[in-house]
Image: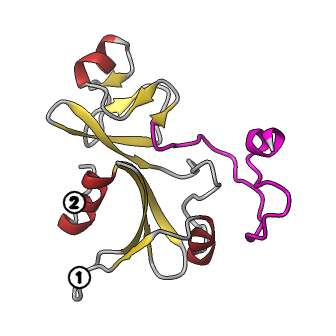
C-alpha cells in the first residue's frame, strides 16, 4: 500500500481505469510544495514566493510559474493549475472526463449557464477543500484547487484568475 501511494498508483485490486500518471508538479488540496491555501500575501512575499515584478495578469509564485494564485482579502484561496500540473491522482488538462469521474466518483456535476462560452465542471470536494475540473464534455480543460466555497463561487460567477 505504501509503495502504491508513493508511486502515485492505486493499490492492487483497484479496478479503476489505469493510465500512466503524467509528469508535472502535483497540486493538492493543501496547495503546492511550500505554498498552502490560507497563506497570506505578506507571508508569501516575505518568504520570496509571491512575485509582483513579473509581467502577468496578477502576482505569480516563484518556483510555481504554472500556477495562478487567487487571493481573497489577503489569503490564498484558489490556484489555477497550468498544464502539465496534475492532481495526485494524475488528473490534468486533457484527461478524459470519464477518468475524472472514475477517480473522483462523488464529484458533483456543475452545468455552465446556457448561451455562454463557459465550460461545465466537476467539483470534487473533500471537507472544506475541492478540485474544480472545468471540461468541454470530453476532456478536462482546466484544473483549479482550493477552498470548496471559493471554487464553487468561481464557477457560478464565471471569473478567472485575471
Magenta segment, prevailing SS (helix, strand or loop): loop
- The label on residue 113 is 1
Sort mark 2 into few (<14), some (14-19) or many (20+) by Cα contacts within 10 Å.
few
The residue drawn where x is 57% and y is 58% is: 92
Alpha-carbon distance for marks 2 and 1? Answer: 14 Å
x then y, percent, for residue 43:
29, 17
Which residue is at the far top?
Answer: 46
Q: Earlier in the sequence, mark 2 or mark 1?
A: 1
Q: Number of numbered discs present?
A: 2
**Residue nearer the viewer, 113 or 62:** 113
Element under disc 1: loop
Q: In which quarter of the image is residue 100?
A: bottom right
In this figure, which residue is indicated by the disc labeled 2?
Answer: 153
The residue drawn where x is 18% and y is 30% is: 74
x then y, percent, for residue 105:
56, 70
The residue drawn where x is 25% and y is 52% is: 150
Colour scheme employed for the rendering of this structure: secondary structure
Please give the range of residues in magenta. 2-30
Amino acid at each position: 500500500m505504501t509503495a502504491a501511494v508513493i508511486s502515485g498508483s492505486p493499490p492492487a485490486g483497484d479496478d479503476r481505469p489505469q493510465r500512466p500518471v503524467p509528469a508535472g508538479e502535483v497540486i493538492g488540496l493543501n496547495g503546492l510544495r511550500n505554498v498552502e491555501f490560507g497563506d497570506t500575501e505578506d507571508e508569501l512575499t516575505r518568504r520570496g514566493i509571491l512575485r509582483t515584478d513579473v509581467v502577468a495578469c496578477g502576482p505569480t509564485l516563484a518556483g510555481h510559474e504554472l500556477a495562478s494564485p487567487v487571493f481573497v482579502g489577503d489569503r490564498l484561496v484558489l490556484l489555477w493549475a497550468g498544464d502539465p500540473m496534475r492532481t495526485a491522482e494524475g488528473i490534468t488538462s486533457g484527461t478524459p472526463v470519464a477518468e475524472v469521474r472514475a477517480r473522483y466518483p462523488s464529484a458533483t456535476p456543475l452545468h455552465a449557464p446556457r448561451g455562454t462560452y463557459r465550460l461545465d465542471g466537476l467539483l470534487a470536494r473533500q471537507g472544506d477543500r475541492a478540485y474544480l475540473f472545468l471540461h468541454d464534455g470530453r476532456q478536462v480543460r482546466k484544473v483549479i484547487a482550493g477552498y470548496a466555497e471559493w471554487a464553487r463561487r468561481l464557477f457560478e460567477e464565471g471569473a478567472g484568475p485575471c
